[in-house]
Image (spheres, helix red, strand yellow):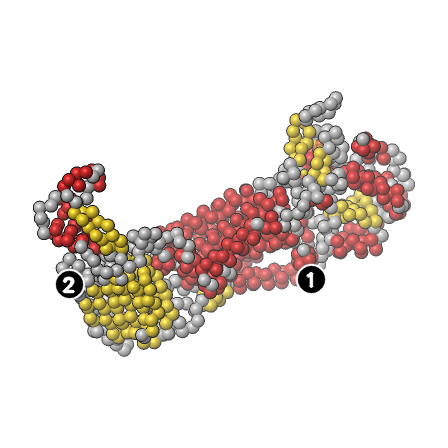
Amino acid sequence: MTMSWSRRIAGLVVAGGVLILLRAGSLTPLRTAPDGTAMLRLSWSARPERIEQCRRLSDAELAARPQHMRLRWECEGRFARYLLRVSVDGRVLAADTVRGGGLRSDRPMHVFREYAVIPGERRVTVSLRRIDAEVRPDSVADAATAAGTGAADRETREGQERRVRRAEALPALVRMDSTLTVAAQRVVLVTYSSIAHRFVIKRPAVLAFFTTEHTEETEGHDKSVGVKTAHHAKDCVALAGPPRSCTPLWPSGCSPCAPW
Amino acid sequence: MRPLRAADAAATRLYGWRHNPLHQTGTVAAALLGLLIVTGLYLLVFYRVGAPWQSVQRLQADPWLGRWIRSLHRFASDALVVAVVLHAWRLFAQARAWGPRALAWTSGVVLLTVLFISGWTGYVMVWDNFGAQLAVSGARLFDAVPVLSEPVRRIFAGDQAVPSVFFFLNLFLHVALPLAAAAGLWIHLSRLARPALLPPRPLLYAICGALTLLAIVWPSPLAPEAALLSISSQVPADLFYAFWLPWADALPPWLAWTGALVTFGIAFAMPWFTHRPRTAEWTPSVVDERSCTGCNQCPQDCPWEAITMVPREHAHGAQSAFVARVDPAHCVSCGVCAGSCAPMGVGPADRTGRDQLARLRAFIERSDTLARRPVAICCEHAAPAHVAPLMEHGAEVRLVPCAGNLHTSVIELSLRAGAPGVMVYTCAPRDCRGREGPKWLHERVYNDREAELQARVDRARVATAVMAPGDWAGTLAAWTQFSAQLAALSESATVPLDEQLGAICEPVPLEEEAR
Ligand code: HEM
Ligand code: SF4
Ligand code: SF4
């Protein structure tokens, strides 16, 4: 089949058209979110508190156990469930039970939620409250070892381990109530600091929001002494001019709008 | 089938049947896979898992090599999807998706899936806003499957930088999957004898050149770096790989998964949906062991490696120790073996050389048209639309399922019956459903391949040509030239064909077969 020039030119034009279509398909502007959207994102992993019933074994009982199973305190229990409540401007977006991961709920609790919010000044409240009743006879176990009643090394270690676990666990209540100016096309990320036991708001690299009022509360964290702690920070007032925000990371409350 | 024929005709009109890209979508896909591996190796040298977007930005900033190689890699991967989808569509439309081809089909579906996943990882690696969108949407789908207790989406929450290990995993998959696809190609082609892996050189160079030109003249830009605490209202998406993105984001994850799995399931199970009863044109070939001389020709010619030589169970007298045997599970009923057997002992029912001769002889007894007009033996799949006009141009048309089926004795008998000449029209060689029909026909007519056209037959009265939709001019030109050649011959030569040819045309008397 010999090709006429007109065919060759038509062939080139069609090939060019196919290439243009290929490039267009390769770089198609795809709408992924409507303009003027903003989002509240909750994301954290935390270990729920373990609610357990402990019994001190007698020396005879301990001796009857195999060597590797000799724990002075025999505890049975489960991990606490929490009520997660999220509201924006008083409108409740979520109020549901969250629990630890895994089939037996004995793994860390992982939360990842996203809620579309209308940009502007918004009052955002997030709280995580323990649902299960605060039965803690295990404090006796801690108290016993803490008091150093002449228990063996192992018993002391057991008590310490339990205390460390509890210190890492979620407190009975973590709450954040913040009024933010949320910018369009930005995400307000609320995460949980398991070191500071409080919610932390993360800011985008570019100005997304600034905090005008921020209150937070952590309750029942220091359980061994049963103290209720609360932090109130109303000291972050957004200023006009360069974007400012505060990232409350430390229990002392957010330092007064440190420039960033 | 009709849209495919129309597309074929249009492409043949533009590029000729030799370089019609639609005829060789499989080889074009394999060539593009090769091009991707080569360009990918270059990009790999510069990619950094610790700073993915920045490393791509550095490549993009290099106008001499980096920018266009990156774009070439992207456009070639898009062209690959187009080629593979056309390849699958073609084979489906030509009823080549079932039976012994089921392995090629199902492995093809897996290959396509692997390509999509590999493309997904490739775009995520760039870590621009499109890559992040793919990652987040993928993670959303992944999180719907209760495998991990920690949602994968937490990686992209924005509270901390995405760990390098994530990009390392992506890179690993992006390199490993195409290599797995290349290995998978071996399974894909395992049932084929002599698979063609590359398109003809001019087409290969044209495709690579065109994509390179596009990459140089109009390279792909680099989108802004992913910002996980920002919401992009629009991203520059590659629809060849991210066509699912709008659905995946709009539908609940379970529905998106169901859609994906059902689509995969339907595509994978296509060989079972399109299965035909193995009768009539789909009957597998059989060997008549009485006729088989153990010459080992049909196993060499079978394009699907469906024939093996096995020891004969009851050898009598001078019979060969080995005999051909067809494995019906591998035989696609192409009939190419029928044309390869000199003693006419193999072929699908009703299509062996002997059946062809018997039919022709019955026709000769019924009608004398053969003696008056040149014969055009046409592959019935080649270009059905050309048959009627060819008859108007004085051809006595006879159809065969594939030119590779045609036993050369039929050509000889036609001439002996008085036909002035015999033209065999084949389909375009790269479009042959029997894969190698035109090639073997040519070898048998001109190069003495078994079962060869006997030397005594005047080659001036025999011709072969390609008949392709969209190239009626080519079909007609070949016919006109052949007719002119025959006209010149009839003026000069008056010697009739050997009267004794009939006996030689029949290696085993038909009566014996009846017994
Ligand atoms: C990376 C992707 C693919 C490549 C590179 C590829 C390549 C090829 C090549 C080179 C051939 C042999 C052509 C020949 O010599 O006759 C072939 C055959 C075949 N391909 Fe693919 N292919 C791919 C994907 C697919 C897909 C997605 C399907 C279907 C869903 C498919 C179905 C088939 C079938 C059924 C055959 C056998 C044809 C026959 O036996 O007549 N392939 N492929
Ligand atoms: S018909 Fe003959 S050549 Fe074709 S696949 Fe079957 S055995 Fe092989
Ligand atoms: S071509 Fe014919 S004779 Fe030769 S091995 Fe095959 S069946 Fe037997």
Residue located beneath label 1 in the image? A6
The percent position of residue A101, horizontal first and vertical second, equals 32, 54
* Image mark 1: chain: A
Q: Amino acid at mark 1?
A: Ser
Q: Is residue B507 left or right of residue A74?
A: right
| Quarter of the image where ligand 3 sits | top right
* Image mark 2: chain: A
Which quadrant holds residue B415? top right
Residue located beneath label 2 in the image? A227
Note whether residue B292 is visible: no
Q: What element does badge 2 sit on?
A: loop
Q: Amino acid at mark 2?
A: Val
Above or below residue B339? Residue A43 is below
Rounded to the nearest angstrom, the CA distance separating label 2 from label 1 is 90 Å
The percent position of residue B29, horizontal first and vertical second, equals 56, 51
The percent position of residue B318, horizontal first and vertical second, equals 74, 23
Frontmost residue, B34 versus A111: A111
Q: Quadrant of the C terminus of chain B?
A: top right
Above or below residue A163? Residue A85 is below
Residue in the picture at 65% in, 40% down:
B331
Q: Quadrant of the N terminus of chain B?
A: bottom right
Q: Is residue B99 left or right of residue B291?
A: left
Residue in the picture at 53% in, 62% down:
A25
